[in-house]
Image (cartoon, rainbow, N blue to C red):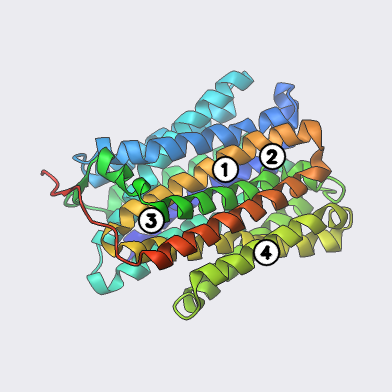
Amino acid sequence: MDKRLWVLALGMFALGTDTFVIAGVLPRIAQTYGVDIASAGQLTTLYAVAYALLAPTVAALAANVPRKQLMLWALGIFVLANLATALAPTFALALASRVFAGLGAAMFAPTATGTGASIVPPERRGQAIAVIVAGLTAATALGSPIGTVIGGLNDWRWTMYFVSAIGAAAGLGILLLLKDLPLPPRVGFKARLAPLQDARVGWTLLTTFLGMAGNFLVYIYFAAVFSPVLANAFVFGALLVVWGTSGTATNLALARVLDRVSPGKVLLAMLLVLAADMLVLPFARTQLWSAFLVVAVWGATGWGIQGPQQYRLVGMAPALAPVLLGLNTAATYLGVTAAGLLGALGLHTVGAQGLSLLSAGIFVLAIFASRMAGRRIAAQPAPLPAAGLQAARS
């Protein structure tokens, strides 16, 4: 395996850890700044909304910036922003630092994926992308639990130092191992948003948005929801490991299933199980063994949403795959943003024990959106027009 891919995957691991680890140290952050859990959860919300809104914008504006230079800038901003979070004397400054962390992530993630596909032979591009994306999914199984344990045993600020160190290591690897690369084809901002005019894309992205909103509504406030069984940092970390590893296993399994089973059917099964799991969660969260079980099912099915969604989007227009997957990433992080806001409202209205019931309702809406997407795709099988692509200027 090309070692340059592992360096890019390490960068994605840092980004993924930063996305998920805040939930693991949320009570300690709230205590440090004298705010409630709902307010502290907006650290994740601001990171997610910055990532979602800035990723397509940066990709369009930085089309002529050399890829290696852009990734080094991205990781530099990301590392400094996480250090700023750790050192922030006030909650307002901590919130501001999360916007810059989201900017760094928005600059790095799409660039790393495109770079990985360009540095290997065409027949190995799928494998290259899978390795890089694996860095993101590994963050749920390893990065977030490790960061949670570090924050639980010490001060939560050490968790942010941990994330910064991973980002710095990835930047060093890129500096040493990657050469300057040719610029990819340029896609303007207008062209990146053009697919949204197609109802097939719109309903599919709405499914992603709702699925991720339902998924992260509970995850962001994990500490509050599972407080009856979180005896120490190691139990917390173990639950997060179960959540992440079960999701990773599902994604590996789906790589074989999606070529033989309709993505709509797979998605329906995942969303139905998720809704049922969220309905059971208020009763399961009070015992450790049942909490582990419900978290395992939740992780497996929650992460199982993305595979069918990406499969659907690529099938609509293989030539526009990078653009469509970029829109799907934006929908994902807008869903995380909505989850942070709805979860904060839910904590003040229905309490931590009721958040999963809100998630179940959102998953029902996601089922409706998915069915509408499936009908539109079946009624209009012709691929999307690949318009608006321009050759990059060197």
Label 4: few (<14), some or many (≥20) within 10 Å? some
Decide which of tag 3 and tag 4 comes sooner along the chain.
Answer: 3
**Element class at badge 2:** helix
Against 246, residue 60 (above or below) is above
Q: Residue 169, image x and y in percent? A: 43, 47
Q: Residue 328: which disc?
A: none
Nearest-to-viewer mark from 1 and 2: 1
Amino acid marked by disc 2 = Val
In three-dimensional space, the C-alpha distance between marks 1 and 3, rounded to whole angstroms, equals: 26 Å
In three-dimensional space, the C-alpha distance between marks 4 and 2, rounded to whole angstroms, equals: 30 Å
- The residue furthest left is 394
- The residue furthest front is 379
Q: Residue 139, image x and y in percent? A: 55, 54
Tell me if I can see residue 166 in this picture.
Answer: no
Q: Which residue is mark 2?
A: 25
Label 1: few (<14), some or many (≥20) within 10 Å? many
**Element class at badge 4:** helix
Residue 262 appears left or right of 158: left
**Element class at badge 1:** helix
Label 2: few (<14), some or many (≥20) within 10 Å? many
Amino acid marked by disc 3 = Val
Tell me if I can see residue 341 in this picture.
Answer: yes
Q: Quadrant of residue 380?
A: bottom left
**Could you say which is closer to the camera, residue 317 or residue 332?**
317
Q: Residue 336: which disc?
A: 1
Decide which of tag 1 and tag 2 comes sooner along the chain.
Answer: 2
Decide which of tag 4 and tag 2 comes sooner along the chain.
Answer: 2
Q: Which residue is mark 3?
A: 7
